[in-house]
Amino acid sequence: MKKILPWLMTGLLLALSLGQLTRIGLLNQPVYIYLYDLIVGFSVIAFIWKRKQLDLHTKLTKAVGLFLGWTVISLVISIPFYSVNEHVIAVLYLLRLMMYFGFMVMLLCFDHKQQLVSTTAVRAFMILVVTGAWVQYLLYPNLGNLAYLGWDPHLYRMVGLFFDPPTAASVFALIALYVYYAKAYQSKVKWILLAILTVMFILTVSRGALLSAVVTITLVFARRVNWKYLIAGMITLFIIWNLVPGKSLESLNIFRTTTIRTRIEDYQKAIEIWQKSPITGIGYNHITPEKNKYEETTEWLEPYNPSHASASFHSSFMVILVTTGVVGLGLFIYMLWQLSTVHQYAQTSLIFLSLFSLFDNVLLLPLVMVVWVILTRALLSADKHKQTVSH
């Protein structure tokens, strides 16, 4: 039992690197669990078993507790307005959310002297993600035959094993920031890795990710970046971009307006639903039955075309606002603030993810959440180990 947590973290990184390949369908319905869901669940049990090494008397724990407590209250308030079946589904969503946030708190509050996430495991994770992404981009650039599983038919976009540009862009950015803040890499190696990851990030062709990255760099790195090198790098990437196959496709047009209109309509729908219960929200997560009232078609319910967006909105903040109201949104932002204080990496990466989450629901993606917290924990342990050695 002594070594079970490090082994679980290593297994979790492996499962995360495999992305959608670990998805398990249930009862021939568009309901799925992932291998990393199971490992996170076992990890929470292991953390509880090792609770003597947990320091839960922190502002972070209180912030997460307040937010999760309010999600329970808002769901209870919604009881008279939905069916039993809808409440069962909502409870399952909420339990999953609580499991993941509980995992995050326990991992961050566990004794920092314990190296739960090894450098070797993180490097293996990085190698698998990078290799999988390039194999997909070079050998399997057309994902059109995955449309029957509910995935968009992306063409000439680097999505790796995640099958989704926003998810891939988030993971690439989190790894790049980890490399930047990690002290274990020599300068030349660090910049080579960052160059590779930047190209991968660009090839996702996620405009929300690109805009969020530019704003994050401006806010966080403006005083540290040599702008001459940055401009030279942008020109180089522009040249590379023009060599990308299929750049004339509408999906690769960074000035396309179709997705902008779709998001505006999505936000308008979210505001209309939120206005039904602006203070407490409709309860986490009753979005699906509410969205069904606005849908002209129910294709997403068909087994051959299960939409992955039926239970959310494009913006993570819209999801929280609609389901938990203004009170829940305020508590959610306060929780993010407390999470950002644990390490400089956490702060920078959460700025990026929060900005990105205005366009795509990445902050509430379990895979992104777990990658973020594991890399944060790895840096916390590395810094603590270095301080111990220096003393």
Image (tube, rainbow, N blue to C red):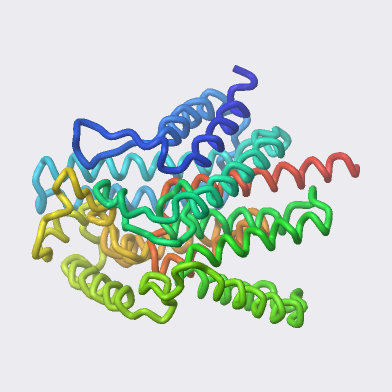
Q: Quadrant of the C terminus?
A: top right
Question: Is residue 187 toward the left or the right of residue 251 in the image?
Answer: right
Please provide percent x and percent y for residue 330: 40, 65
Q: Quadrant of residue 164?
A: bottom left
Q: Position of residue 364 (x, y in %)?
A: 40, 54
Q: Is residue 62 visible?
A: no
The answer to which of 196 and 6 lies nearer the viewer is: 196
Give the number of callouts.
0
What's the residue at 33%, 60% (across, down)? 320
Q: Residue furthest right?
A: 391
Above/below status of 301 relative to 222: above
Q: Residue furthest top?
A: 1
**Left or right: residue 371 compared with residue 266:** right
Choose between 58 and 29: the one closer to the eye.
29
The residue sitting at 14% across, 47% down in the picture is: 302
The quadrant where residue 196 appears = bottom right
Kindly identify the residue that appears in the image at 10 percent across and 60 percent down. 297
Q: Residue at x 21, y 58 (%)?
A: 282
- Residue 111: x and y in percent read 67, 35
Q: Is residue 323 above or below residue 45?
A: below
Front in this rendered view, residue 182 or 114: 182
Q: Position of residue 338 (x, y in %)?
A: 55, 57
Q: Quadrant of the N terminus?
A: top right
The answer to whether any part of residue 267 appears in the image is: yes
